[in-house]
Image (cartoon, helix red, strand yellow):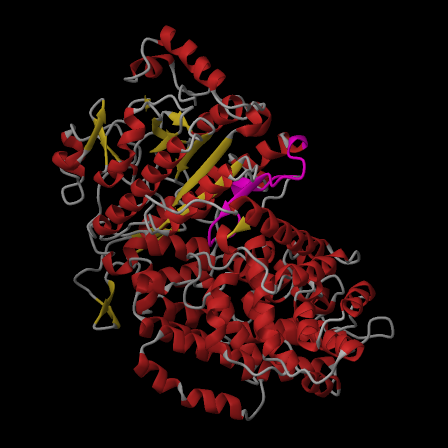
């Protein structure tokens, strides 16, 4: 499904269309050279309640569906068009006001799957066919640029969880680290040299070869990270959270010349079936404060035009709150895109709160349109090839 | 019976040797110290499978550890209980019981992060230790009444008139049938059958007041079903034996079992009324299990890696000190990453986990009993860890390195060949 002309024209900051198109092209043209561009992919794991993230606070239907969980109008960080941000996201206001924050509304896909795992895989692979869910969309984007990396690390996953399927390519293999500042081999360079030689074995199975590859990658990544982080500035302005630490590390690695094109990180805990409010409030603050600090950092240190960050979650949650003061698995939800190259503003209307499908918001924008936009306008690669079909790009880059 | 599950007959080319016996112990347990391997080889493969399936008649280590059980519950400390569990894996003679309990922990993956009551988590793990080798229907019936599970999947807020679908969804998707074998409507209806299954004063309690006694249709069968009816209807599904069979095979035998093998194990589960212990006993005797392509086809989990190293090197275990390493390697007991459990295989050895592994090797080596040096150390410790001789190339690298005994052991533990199981 593609965004239609009417929806496009209706979105508050992008009319009239004639004036928008050149602006879009200009922003891309002024942005960094393709090889210097960095993309940050931030997963909100568990199914973020989009309705309490980007809140349609002028609609009674919202408060009727959320008698306990509805966020009072006075607490909302007003954006435009009758929607505003959860108060925890207030630190993102600077990016919004500078025109560096795009809010993609009503994003989802046809016949939404409500399993965390299946839907996460769908988002990561951009595929509905379980048989073809072996590689991720960002991994395939790396494959398409494979010749340009030299001996640099193509992308980096930061987190406690295993490598995101989004970053799995056919040929390119992406390292993951828990903590870029502590990714060191105990025993120093001498021990590392011996261990590295032990990965030179030839015989054995595919799985053994996979382990050897991973081991070599770990030793090499360890070296590169410490080179890029050498003499970095102090961590000021960032919240003391794992996400804050990771975004700070990403900024330092970009600055220090690691050369990775994509960074992936995640924030988990969004599966709020019961007693949602305190949990979701805390998550929004964690997200907002980390993104606010990241934006500020990029801007102050001259990287804002090189970095675009995008958030996503496997699904939104049901419009009507449940009786355990929580929300169950839903469908369409918003995404954020932040960065100097982003065309700020709302993209698409807030989905209707009354015209629902199975109690869920209907999407009007396919998530692969967002991917296509990144692929074509940020990475200069053939989105159709990577996504398997043509998806109309969105006016956020 | 499928040919694949017929008893394995060793031959001159496919002998019952150290490699085969260490394969059995790596899969049915956490590896074997050299002396246990020698003892195993004095039995036939079938006798060895029985020995593994039954466990020793008397086991002082188990008695000693069982004696601490009550103390642990009084302490209400998740870490103390975790250290106790790892110690069981290291010391208990009935290795299969410990290994299978860990399988069920990954299958019914519940985390302290949400449950928040260490004692509830400890009680749940006790179910896996006590019922893990018995019949699956009994374990399942206990798990749906388990307070930790009820809280984990929000069934305590699943009430008549406003069902919470979380438990019913995972019951079908992850515990019994797998994706694609049920509809959203089946989930909604099944959720109603589990309304009123609550926790009161730390115990399971069925509340008639909150239970929806109305008519439900699940998998095309209509009735005023309660939770146990849903379990029964689910267990009758063909998808259920295949789903469970596949998971057992992926954990104990091979990462990508053939459909024929899945069918065969599914049929045995059906025929035995889901007797896990009996099916595992048959597997550990089978041709399929000793297939050379099956050996070393799995990636060691962090627990298999560390506990195996301790057992194979007769190292002094300090399991409490290992807990932070296990967390870094991605396997924190009582805290699987999510309800799907640990993904395993390649995911165990992504770069972050690998670095944690080789740094853990240093710690493990520091507690190993290393009396040998140089080439003798490489040959002996290498064989004990790998179950076969150290590859020539690695041996050459290690000899040239001039490393001391502990560094040699660390390097052997960091050898990619040691991380396949």
* Count of numbered tags: 0
Left or right relative to B281: residue A357: left
Position of residue B417 relative to residue A151, above or below, is: below
**Residue B310 or residue A6, whichever sits in front:** B310
Q: Residue drawn 46% across and 87% down?
A: B65
| Residue B166: % across, % down | 33, 53
Quarter of the image where the C terminus of chain B is located:
bottom right
Position of residue B365 relative to residue B189, above or below, is: below
Outermost residue, front side:
A231
Q: Residue drawn 20% across and 65% down?
A: B207
Outermost residue, right side:
B12
**Residue B35 or residue A231, whichever sits in front:** A231
| Residue A165: % across, % down | 53, 44
In the picture, residue B370 is in which quadrant? bottom right
| Residue A169: % across, % down | 61, 39
Quarter of the image where the N terminus of chain B is located:
bottom right
Left or right relative to B407: residue A259: left
In the picture, residue B265 is in which quadrant? bottom right
| Residue A179 magenta-highlighted | no
- Looking at the magenta stretch, what is its main secondary structure? loop
Q: Is residue B419 visible?
A: yes
In the picture, residue B142 is in which quadrant? bottom left
| Residue A83: % across, % down | 22, 28
Range of the magenta residues?
Answer: A147-170
| Residue A157 magenta-highlighted | yes
Q: Is residue A111 visible?
A: no
């Amino acid at each position: 499904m593609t965004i239609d002309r009417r929806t496009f024209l209706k979105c508050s900051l992008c009319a009239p269309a004639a004036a928008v198109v050149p602006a879009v092209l200009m922003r891309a043209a002024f942005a960094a050279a393709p090889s210097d561009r960095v993309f940050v992919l931030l997963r909100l794991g568990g199914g973020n309640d989009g309705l309490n993230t980007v809140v349609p606070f002028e609609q009674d239907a919202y408060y009727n569906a959320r008698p306990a969980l509805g966020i009072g109008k006075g607490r909302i960080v007003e954006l435009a068009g009758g929607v505003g941000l959860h108060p925890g996201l207030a630190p993102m206001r600077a990016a919004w006001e500078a025109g560096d924050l795009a809010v993609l509304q009503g994003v989802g896909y046809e016949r939404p799957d409500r399993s965390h795992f299946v839907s996460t895989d769908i988002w990561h692979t951009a595929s509905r066919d379980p048989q073809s869910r072996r590689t991720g969309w960002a991994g395939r984007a790396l494959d398409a640029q494979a010749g340009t990396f030299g001996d640099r690390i193509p992308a980096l996953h930061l987190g406690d969880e295993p490598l995101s399927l989004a970053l799995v390519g056919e040929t390119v293999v992406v390292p993951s680290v828990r903590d870029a500042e502590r990714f060191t081999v105990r025993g120093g360079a001498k021990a590392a040299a011996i261990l590295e030689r032990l990965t030179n074995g030839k015989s054995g199975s595919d799985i053994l070869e996979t382990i050897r590859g991973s081991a070599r990658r770990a030793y090499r990544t360890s070296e590169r990270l410490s080179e890029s982080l050498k003499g970095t500035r102090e961590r000021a302005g960032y919240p003391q959270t794992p996400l804050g630490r990771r975004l700070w590390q990403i900024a330092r690695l970009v600055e220090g010349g690691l050369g990775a094109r994509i960074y992936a990180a995640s924030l988990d805990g969004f599966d709020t079936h019961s007693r949602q409010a305190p949990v979701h409030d805390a998550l929004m603050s964690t997200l907002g404060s980390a993104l606010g600090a990241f934006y500020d950092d990029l801007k102050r240190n001259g990287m804002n035009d090189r970095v675009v960050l995008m958030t996503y979650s496997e699904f939104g949650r049901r419009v009507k709150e449940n009786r355990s003061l929580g929300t169950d698995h839903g469908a369409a939800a918003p995404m954020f895109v932040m960065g100097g190259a982003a065309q700020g503003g709302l993209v698409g209307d807030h989905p209707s709160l009354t015209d629902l499908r199975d109690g869920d918001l209907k999407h009007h924008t396919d998530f692969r349109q967002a991917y296509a936009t990144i692929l074509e306008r940020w990475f200069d690669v053939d989105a159709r090839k990577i996504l398997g079909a043509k998806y109309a790009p969105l006016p956020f880059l | 019976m499928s040919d694949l599950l017929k008893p394995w007959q060793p031959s001159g080319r496919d002998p019952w040797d150290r490699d085969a016996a260490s394969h059995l112990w790596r899969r049915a347990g956490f590896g074997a110290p050299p002396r246990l391997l020698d003892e195993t080889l004095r039995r036939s493969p079938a006798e060895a499978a029985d020995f593994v399936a039954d466990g020793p008649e008397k086991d002082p280590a188990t008695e000693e550890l069982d004696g601490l059980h009550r103390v642990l519950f009084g302490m209400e400390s998740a870490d103390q209980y975790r250290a106790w569990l790892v110690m069981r894996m290291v010391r208990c003679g009935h290795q299969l019981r410990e290994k299978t309990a860990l399988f069920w922990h990954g299958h019914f993956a519940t985390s302290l992060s949400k449950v928040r009551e260490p004692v509830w988590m400890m009680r749940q793990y006790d179910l896996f230790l006590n019922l893990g080798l018995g019949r699956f229907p009994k374990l399942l019936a206990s798990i749906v009444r388990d307070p930790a599970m009820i809280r984990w999947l929000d069934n305590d807020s699943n009430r008549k008139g406003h069902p919470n679908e979380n438990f019913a969804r995972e019951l079908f998707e992850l515990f019994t049938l797998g994706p694609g074998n049920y509809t959203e409507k089946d989930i909604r209806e099944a959720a109603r059958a589990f309304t009123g299954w609550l926790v009161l004063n730390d115990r399971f309690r069925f509340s008639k007041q909150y239970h929806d006694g109305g008519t439900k249709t699940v998998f095309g069968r209509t009735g005023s079903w309660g939770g146990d009816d849903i379990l029964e209807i689910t267990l009758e599904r063909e998808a259920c034996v295949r789903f469970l069979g596949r998971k057992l095979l992926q954990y104990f035998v091979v990462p990508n079992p053939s459909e024929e093998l899945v069918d065969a194990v599914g049929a045995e589960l059906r025929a035995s009324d889901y007797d896990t212990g009996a099916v595992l006993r048959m597997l550990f005797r089978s041709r399929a299990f000793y297939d050379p392509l099956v050996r070393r086809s799995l990636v060691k989990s962090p627990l298999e890696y560390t506990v195996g190293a301790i057992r194979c090197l007769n190292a002094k275990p300090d399991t409490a000190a290992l807990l932070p390493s296990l967390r870094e390697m991605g396997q924190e007991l009582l805290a699987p990453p999510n309800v799907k459990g640990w993904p395993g295989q390649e995911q165990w050895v992504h770069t972050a986990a690998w670095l944690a592994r080789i740094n853990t090797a240093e710690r493990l080596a520091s507690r190993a009993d290393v009396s040998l040096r140089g080439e003798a150390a490489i040959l002996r410790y290498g064989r004990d860890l790998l179950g076969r001789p150290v590859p020539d190339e690695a041996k050459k690298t290690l000899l040239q390195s001039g490393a001391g005994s502990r560094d040699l052991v660390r390097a052997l533990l960091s050898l990619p060949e040691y991380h396949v199981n």
